[in-house]
Amino acid sequence: SQQGEEDPQALSIQEGENATMNCSYKTSINNLQWYRQNSGRGLVHLILIRSNEREKHSGRLRVTLDTSKKSSSLLITASRAADTASYFCATVLTYNTDKLIFGTGTRLQVFP
Amino acid sequence: ETGVTQSPTHLIKTRGQQVTLRCSSQSGHNTVSWYQQALGQGPQFIFQYYREEENGRGNFPPRFSGLQFPNYSSELNVNALELDDSALYLCASSLGGGPYGYTFGSGTRLTVV
């Protein structure tokens, strides 16, 4: 079963705009990770945030984690056409660290 | 440093046949996990191998089996293929288990007809 749900399911923006995707989960986590997938191919690891962290940055990416609300958000600033992809959050549970549990994904379309 | 390599890239099989998918893990990584991703869905965990032993399994039937070799490469075997097995199969390697990020391969697209 999917632990995470992402919102929105699809997002269309213009180049230069910011894109925000949200992820909610159900069970206590060790960490939460965000991945990008281009055209149904392999997943690319973007960022990992641990349960005791609240915010992390990597280039144009900003991830927040609110464990009290069991939610995370991914912000991509100054979007580019090359950011067009599906974005997935994945959780690693506190007591079962052998797997990633993926959400349903957000399809981001960035128009030039 | 090489990433994760999967072969073949695409595969078409007939219902009832058996298939073997292969994965070479990233250099230095000792853990390999396999995921199944149906069209339009997030990946689903199949199982994980750590130092040649199965280290966790998802909700998949026994006809899904795997191996990890001393060089940490891995195989996923699926027997008695069903139409619903059509999916993208992703291999991911990591150093240790879940508390780290994973490196994914480009996947094998399996079509069962």
Image (spheres, coloured by chain):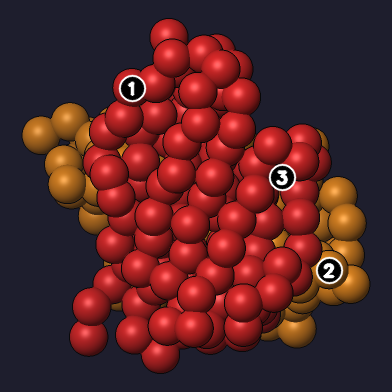
Chain colours: A orange, B red
Marks 2, 3: nearer the viewer: 2
Task: Name the foreground residue: A42 vs A94.
Answer: A42
Residue at point 39%, 55% (across, down):
B22
Q: Residues within 10 Å of mark 3 (few under 14, many from 20)?
A: many
| Rendered position, A92 above or below A73 | below
Apparent side of residue B10 relative to residue B20 in the rendered image (left or right): left
Task: Name the foreground residue: B86 vs B62.
Answer: B62
For disc 1, the chain is: B
Apparent side of residue B108 relative to residue A99 in the rendered image (left or right): left
| Rendered position, A7 above or below B4 | above
Residue at point 62%, 77% (across, down):
B52
In space, the residues marked 2 and 3 are separated at their CA atoms by 15 Å
**Amino acid type for the residue under numbered disc 2:** Asn
Q: Find numbered disc 1 in the image and state the secondary structure of the residue it sits on.
A: strand
- Residue A8 drawn at (x, y percent): 55, 31
- Residue A96's tag is 2
Would you name the residue on which mark 1 appears?
B12
**Amino acid type for the residue under numbered disc 3:** Gly
For disc 2, the chain is: A
Task: Name the foreground residue: A77 vs A51.
Answer: A51
Q: Find numbered disc 3 in the image and state the secondary structure of the residue it sits on.
A: loop
- Residue A45 drawn at (x, y percent): 42, 65
Residue at point 42%, 83% (across, down):
B71
For disc 3, the chain is: A
Would you name the residue on which mark 3 appears?
A4
In space, the residues marked 1 and 3 are separated at their CA atoms by 31 Å
